[in-house]
Image: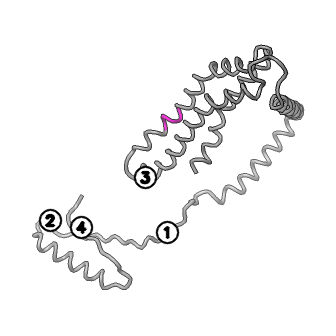
Amino acid sequence: SGLIISVGVVVVASIVVLENIYRHYRGAPEEGALRAARLGTQEVALATTAGMLTTVVVLVPVMFAGGYTQETMRPLNVVVVATLVASLLAALMVVPLLSSRLLGGRGGGAARSPGRLAAVVDGAVEALGRVLLALARGALARRWLVLALAAVFLVLTLKHVKPLIGGELMPLMDTGIVTIEFETPSDLPPARVAAVLGAVEAVVQSQPGVLAISSTVGSE
């Protein structure tokens, strides 16, 4: 579950670093991919680190909250924190190294085949951007139709969500544990209280299916 939650956050740092490196390389390819990797990483290193650490700082205290919260949330938070830190290190160390290699090395000559592959991918992304821009323009030209469709989808969503309201993700479970409390007068001697407790235990033990009994005398 922790990995599933952190998947979207993990790639953010690498995407930001890679995009900035490629922006430098595309702006001045004659200066080499190594310089683009160095400058592109330096520009966004502080912001990327700060953004990632804000999430880590929120999760770390929960790991030491104690009690039920710590027991249930610590495994999830440990996985998320470790994944985020590893992704930050990869974005600041591995991505620049691979980018300097894939975009053509030190020289300003023609890009290697991975660089040509990056150019093909970049062209496909630009084509997708043009398609999305055309869709946005069409939606703005037909605003009332878009709003009507959005309202229809909202109604359909509410139709399916309403039966789920008030439900629980975990069904009711029979734990097999029964708690019995009894009170005695405050001035009753401890020996008499123990006798009452023994009588209650005898009644409980006589019931079929009872495997163990744990008793406590006194109040908290």
Q: Quadrant of residue 24?
A: top right
Q: Of the numbered discs in the image, which one, if any, rests on residue 71?
A: 3
For the C terminus, the quadrant is bottom left
Q: Which residue is mark 2?
A: 186
Residue at 71% x, 57% y is 160
Element type where label 3 sits in the image: helix
- Crowd band around label 4 with a 10 angstrom C-alpha radius: few (<14), some (14–19), many (20+): few
Using the numbered discs, state the Cα–Cα distance from disc 2 to disc 1 in whole angstroms.
37 Å
Using the numbered discs, state the Cα–Cα distance from disc 2 to disc 4 in whole angstroms.
16 Å
Start-end of magenta stretch: 54-58
Residue at 53% x, 41% y is 82
Pick whichever of labels 2 and 3 is earlier in the sequence: 3
Residue at 14% x, 65% y is 186
Pick whichever of labels 4 and 1 is earlier in the sequence: 1
Q: Which residue is mark 1?
A: 173
- Amino acid at dot 1: Met
Pick whichever of labels 3 and 1 is earlier in the sequence: 3
Foreground pick, 105 / 130:
105
Using the numbered discs, state the Cα–Cα distance from disc 2 to disc 3 in whole angstroms.
37 Å
Element type where label 1 sits in the image: loop
Q: Which residue is mark 4?
A: 216
Q: Position of residue 211 (x, y in %)?
A: 35, 79
